Every structure is written in structure tokens, then in C-alpha cells.
Image (spheres, helix red, strand yellow):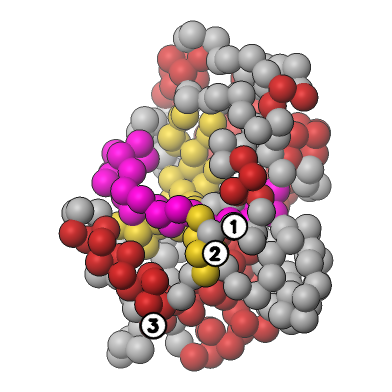
Amino acid sequence: MLPGSPFTPERLVRARRQYRRCTLCEHRCGVDRAGGQRGACGAGGRARVYRHRIEYGEEPELVPSHLFYLSGCNMRCAYCIGEADAFDPSRGRVLSAPFFREAVAWGQAREARNVQWVGGEPTIHLPAVLGVLAACRPPVPLVWKSNFYGTEESWDLLDGCIDVYVADFKFGNDACARRIARVENYLAVVTRNLGLVAQRARLIVRHLLMPGHFDCCYRPVVAWMRKYLPTVPISVRDGYLPRWKASEYPELAALLERDAGRRARALARDCGLEVIS
């Protein structure tokens, strides 16, 4: 471990305790993952990478970005483009220090500007990620892309370790979150966490536009940011595809309206927000 590294033994010990009584996300299952119990995400004591690659479709300031996709998630978004890989924590290669070191070298040879942890959801694998970063921290910034349904404990474990957070602010109300992603108390949890992280590191809020959810989800997201995080940039994503189980939801089975992205970006700018994509 390098001098001054934020990945201290004390932090790693605190993180590993979560495998015995997990409260990394707001399901707060409290299960013994090391002992074989499984909570809402289904994850055990080992993280797996089902894909890593250089991507150019992220926010402009991040590309080219080296994304590490961890399998398993604490939400069940019906339209998830990751489909089974995102939800099944048994998929992929075990995340280990040797594997990570080799993968990072591969990414550096291709001029990746950062290492980005994605999923599934990386927060449910926070102890494993901190462990490999303590063993071999990349020579580039670290990006944490999350659904922000983590607990205050999880953000405290990450504090000082991450350079940029990318937050998926998916829903503008609890009803849509419950119906589409099977989570409770969504708005209170996510907005609390956005407020916490905005004080600690660079934060980008991302919103994927969904058909039929402009007024119920996107408008409230923009209104909340205008009031509470007016200087945080918003990344409006209009590449929605009706994947996974979207066909089970009438509005999600459709494609976005042709001008949805233009209208969404115009609304955000009219509200004084910085739109970065």
C-alpha cells in the first residue's frame, strides 16, 4: 500500500465486515454473505466482472473510459440493457488483484483516461473493489457509476477514494421506482446520497429518458436539481431501448419520441442547469 493511500487497513476491515452483516444498500438485508446467505441482490463474498472494455459513449470529459462491469444489482429495473448479466452475481470472472492489474495495463495501452466501476451495481461489491484498489491502484482517476441506492455507510467507505461519481437518477417519484425497479423509499434515499456526495467529489447526474415518463420522472428530477444541486451538471441520455422485461410494461415497450432528447435538454437549460451531453 502506497504512503497516503486512502485504502487503509482500517477501511478495508470496515468494508469486509459488511460480508457478515450487509448494509451496503438501502435494502439493509443484514445477511451473512460470507456464510452463504443472500439478500435482495443475491451477491456473496466475491465480486465478478462479466465484461471490461474501453467505451466512448460516456460523458465527454470521461472518454475514453475503461469500464469494469460487475455482475449483480440491488435494483430490478425492467428495462435494464445489461439484462441477465447485470442481475446474476455468479456471471463473469472473479475480481482479483492479478486480473485487475493485467486488465488495467490493457486499458492503459489503449489510452483509457480513467477506470470506471459499473454494473449491475458496484456498491454491493464495495469490499472487493476496495481490496483490489488497495493492492493495485490505477495511475488514472477512478469513476464510480451507481444507482445511488446505497447507504450512508457505503458512501463513507468510499469517501476520499473516488475522483468522479456518476449518479443514475432514474425516477422522479417513489411509485415509478417501486413499480419498475422494485425498490422502496427511492427519492429520499437517492436525494440524500446525492447531497452527501456532491460535497465530497466531482458529481455528474445522469438521467435516462424513458418513454411515457417525461412528466412523472424527468421533470421532477430537473426541478429537484434546480433547487438543491443547481451547479451539478446533468447528463441527459436519450438512447433508451426496450430491453430485458420492458415489454411487460406498456409504456416501456415503446421507443422514445423523436424529439424527447431535445425537449429534455431544453428544459434543463431553461432551469439553469449545465447539460453536458
* Residue lying at 67% horizontally and 18% vertically, measured from the top left: 253
Q: Residue at x 45, y 53 (%)?
A: 51
Q: Nearer the viewer, mark 3 or mark 1?
A: 1
Check disc 1 and give the amino acid type: Arg
Q: Which residue has dot 1 on it?
A: 91
Tell me if residue 16 comes above or below residue 51 in the rendering.
below
Residue 214 as seen in the image, left or right of residue 144: right
Above or below 73: residue 276 = above
Q: CA distance from mark 1 to mark 2?
A: 7 Å
At mark 3, the secondary structure is: helix
Determine the CA span between mark 3 and mark 1: 23 Å
Q: Amino acid at mark 2?
A: Arg
Q: Earlier in the sequence, mark 1 or mark 2?
A: 2
Asked if one can make out residue 83 in the rendered structure from this viewpoint, the answer is: yes
For the residues bearing labels 1 and 2, Cβ distance under 8 angstroms = yes
Q: Estimate how packed mark 1 is, as few (under 14), some (14 to 19) or many (20 or more) residues with alpha carbons within 10 Å.
A: some
x, y percentage for residue 10? 53, 90
Q: Earlier in the sequence, mark 2 or mark 3?
A: 2
Q: Secondary structure at mark 1?
A: loop
Residue 223 visible (yes or no): no
Q: Amino acid at mark 3?
A: Ala
Q: Report whether 83 appears left or right of 135.
A: right
Q: State the quadrant of the N terminus.
A: bottom left
Dot label at residue 48: 2
State left or right for residue 238 relative to residue 183.
left
Instruction: Judge by depth and name the residue closer to the eye, 44 or 199.
Output: 44
The magenta-colored residue range is 51-75
- Give the residue number, with chain letter if any, for mark 3: 135
Q: Nearer the viewer, mark 1 or mark 2?
A: 1
